[in-house]
Every structure is written in C-alpha cells, then in structure tokens.
Image (cartoon, grey):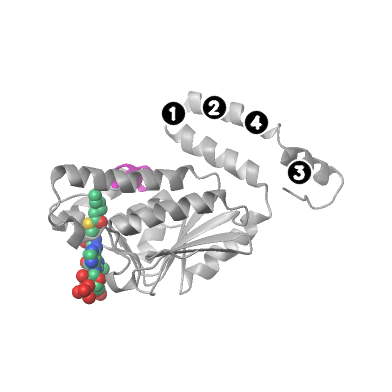
Amino acid sequence: MSFETIIYEAKNNIGYITINRPKALNALNAEVLNELSQAVDIAEKDEAARVVIITGAGGRAFVAGADIAAMQNMTAEEAYSFARLAQIIYNKIQDMPKIVIAAIDGFALGGGCELALACDIRIASAKSKIGIPEVTLGVFPGFAGTQRLPRLVGTGIAKEMLATARKVPADEAKAIGLVNHVVEENPMAKAEELAVEICKNSMSAIALGKRAMNEGMEMELKKGIEHEAALFAVAFTTEDQREGMTAFLEKRPANFQ
Ligand code: HXC
C-alpha cells in the first residue's frame, strides 16, 4: 500500500514501513506523520505481518529529524500539537503487540532517533550516525526523546547527547546500548534475519512478554513482578501455550498460531 511519503508492504510474515521522502532525508512533517500513523495501524492489524520493520528510503538516512522548515514558524500551540501528534504515533509503536525493528542506514537524528527509540530493536549500518541535535536549533527533543533515551542508555549519557548534540557513530551507539547490532552494510538483511527467528516463536507469548516489560518498566519493581504473574497467567489461556508445551513433550517442533 502506498501513500505519498510512506510505503507499506507485507511479505514473508514481515510488515515493512518505509519512510519515503529521501530528498529531505526522510524528515518528518505533518503529512509524513499522518501517513506513518495510518501505516502503523495497518501493520498492527495485518495478519500477514508477524514482525514489523521500519526503515528510511534513499540509503542516506533513517530519518534526519522533524522537518525544520515546517517547524520554523510554528506558534507554541502548534509546536505542542506537532509534538503530541508524533508522540501518540510513537506510543502506538511501543504498544504494538508485535516486535518492531528499526533498520537504520544513515542518519537517525532528532525525531528520527526518537522514532528508533520507540521501536523494540535497533539495527544500524556502520556508517550510521544517531543523535539528538535539537539544541543546535534552539529547541530540544519533543518526540519523547527526553523520556525514552535516558531509560535506554541512562541519564548521564542521555544528558551528554542532549547537551553536546553530537551525532554518535554506530559502533559507539552499540557500546552504549543505543542499538542492538551494527552491521557493515545492509541493516535490513540483519533485521530480516532477526524477524525470521522471531517468527518461529509464539506471537501471543511475545506480545504478552513485551507488554510485561513495557508496563513493568513504568511500575515499582514488586508491582511489576506481580503484574508479570498476571500476564503469565494470561499465557495459559492461549492455544500457543498448549501447543508449545505439548510439542516439547512429544519431541516435535511447535506449530504456533
Ligand atoms: C528538513 C532536512 C532535514 C530536516 C535534512 N534536510 N534534514 N529538511 N528538516 N530535519 C534536507 C536538507 O535541507 C537538504 O535539502 C536535504 O535534506 C539534504 O540535506 P543536506 O543538509 O544537504 O545533507 P548533508 O550535508 O549530507 O547533511 C546531512 C545532515 C543535515 C547532517 C543530516 O541535513 C542535518 O544536520 N539535518 C538536520 C538534522 C537535525 O537537526 N535534526 C533534528 C531536527 S529537530 P535541500 O533542499 O537543501 O537539498 C527535531 C525535533 C523533534 O527533530 C521534536 C519536535 C517537536
């Protein structure tokens, strides 16, 4: 399915969302964000997509940030609405009951870094640079970067990235836990390799486990642990639990739904 600035397709159990505005290094304006929102909704419902991969077109950038030209003359109210528009989409990505992988080939800056942060797994090519350079523009990350980045890499590193605006090279991003894997080139191939592994497992169990982690991270530890037990119990209402355990005991591969 093709919009103006986003391409969505599903093949081999993977839903691909491509941000396709390469002349502006896939910068996010309201049109791109609205289409991204629709693509995320489609991917969530699409039974042909068991894993979702988000990437950027053109081979130079994942996303070079929110569109600076579109933001230049915004009022404070418009800036608030723009931030909320993206934040709500990014929350939908975080909450999606499927694993979402960011395949980063080039710049992932500002709103682009924040989009990658909303995904579950990040893969970067060696040439990639990841950062939150907004303070060079007189603003700061407004697509949830001030919240998700410190939760992922810790406050010390996140505050240094905020204040220096430095574009962190891929190898360093891996060392600080900002990306899961760095590949010489073609992060899509690595993302697809992970997707194939993920697809062998129970989708309902992955969804419940992702939810337990997401929701638990917002709770005090012992509440989170209790919440885990409640969601663990839900797994025992699924066909996949019966199939997975029966298959193990019958010494055959599981055939999950
Ligand atoms: C609009 C952008 C853009 C952006 C690149 N372009 N990034 N347009 N918004 N964020 C456009 C350029 O204007 C240019 O268009 C074309 O893409 C190619 O970019 P160049 O700058 O010519 O390429 P290069 O010299 O290789 O430099 C690449 C770059 C640089 C280092 C990534 O483009 C850059 O610094 N971009 C801005 C990065 C940034 O500050 N991002 C954070 C944005 S604020 P033309 O028409 O000239 O060819 C943000 C806030 C989020 O994300 C929260 C908001 C609430």
Q: Nearer the viewer, mark 4 or mark 2?
A: 4
Q: Answer left or right for 212 relative to 140.
A: right
Q: Which residues are magenta?
A: 145-153
Mark 4 or mark 3: whose residue is earlier in sequence: 4
Q: Which residue is mark 2?
A: 227
Query: Mark 4 to mark 3: distance in Å?
Result: 15 Å
Mark 4 or mark 2: whose residue is earlier in sequence: 2
Q: Which residue is mark 4?
A: 234
> In this picture, is 60 found above or below 64?
below
Q: Nearer the viewer, mark 4 or mark 3?
A: 4
Residue 173: image location, x then y, percent: 37, 59
Of the residues shown, which amino acid type is indicated by label 3? Gly
Disc ID at residue 244: 3
Of the residues shown, which amino acid type is indicated by label 2? His
Residue 176: image location, x then y, percent: 38, 54
Disc ID at residue 219: 1
Secondary element at tag 4: helix
Query: Mark 4 to mark 2: distance in Å?
Result: 11 Å
Secondary element at tag 3: helix
Of the residues shown, which amino acid type is indicated by label 1? Met
Query: Mark 1 to mark 3: distance in Å?
Result: 30 Å
Mark 1 or mark 4: whose residue is earlier in sequence: 1
Secondary element at tag 1: loop
Residue 253: image location, x then y, percent: 79, 53
Q: Are marks 2 and 3 in contact (CB under 8 Å)?
A: no
